[in-house]
Amino acid sequence: MREDPLRLRLDFHGESVVLHDYAGGVVRTKLVSALDVAHALARELDLASGILPPDTLWWARTASGERVAVWREPRVWSVRLRERYDAPPRRLRLPLPGLLFLCLPARQAPYVFAAKARPKTPDDQLYHAPAYNVFGSGRVCTGSHAFPSDPARVPEEFFRSYFSATGDTARGKSQRHPDDVGALWAELDGERAYPLDDLVPALRVADALTIGG
């Protein structure tokens, strides 16, 4: 068997990475960045996103899987609001601002945020989605509703679900009605435009990029 000499060795410690270079007959040792090692190895990989949903704002692949952010322009949405479990839901037609849906892998609950315009930079401001069934973090409370794994279908599926006026998802969504977004919904039912100055800041796009990473 032909000799296969050792050329390079990497030792990964708790807080450092040590490179041992055996080329040239003299062993050279130095500290290197784990990120530089990852970048060097990544150059040998071919990655492709495949066909992305329309209005995709970004796509990311991490150790936990793929994340896709899908944008929906401002429009009037039909919603069903369940105010009591023993009563039929109310049907409303609500104008809402542009919405960003962050879809995570493995059927994790999506996140949703509002924006005054389609985001273009990591520093752009995102706002709390003015809707029930969304926690303060932006994560959707899915309840018993089964959301699809296809990111392109998540926004419409969000509005097909029943919204519940119970729980703690009514607060912090409106400047005029900080304790109950339902009061805002009552004002907007049947209107054509959402009052953008009523949005409540949540986080920057740069922060949203890290969700699920």
Image (spheres, rainbow, N blue to C red):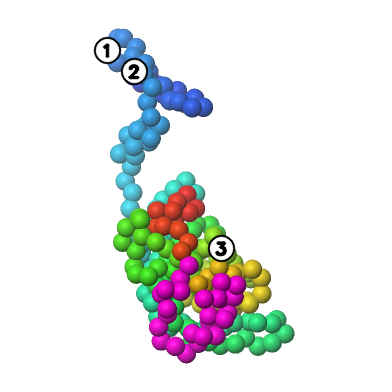
Q: Which residue is mark 1?
A: 24
Cβ atoms under marks 1 and 3 closer than 8 Å:
no
Q: Which residue is mark 2?
A: 21
Q: Residue at x 49, y 85 (%)?
A: 188
| Residue type pointed to by label 1 | Gly
Q: Residue at x 62, y 76 (%)?
A: 164
The answer to whether any part of residue 52 appears in the image is no
| Residue type pointed to by label 3 | Gly
User: Of the residues tagged 1 and 3, which is closer to the observer?
Assistant: 3
Q: Which secondary structure, mark 2? A: strand
Nearer to me, 158 or 139: 139
Q: Which residue is mark 3?
A: 136
Residue 74, image x, y percentages? 38, 77
In this image, 171 relative to 96: left or right? right
Query: For the magenta stretch, what is the residue range?
Result: 176-200
Q: Alpha-carbon distance for marks 1 and 2?
A: 9 Å
Q: Which secondary structure, mark 3? A: loop
Residue 205, image x, y percentages? 40, 57
Q: Alpha-carbon distance for marks 2 and 3?
A: 51 Å
| Residue type pointed to by label 2 | Asp
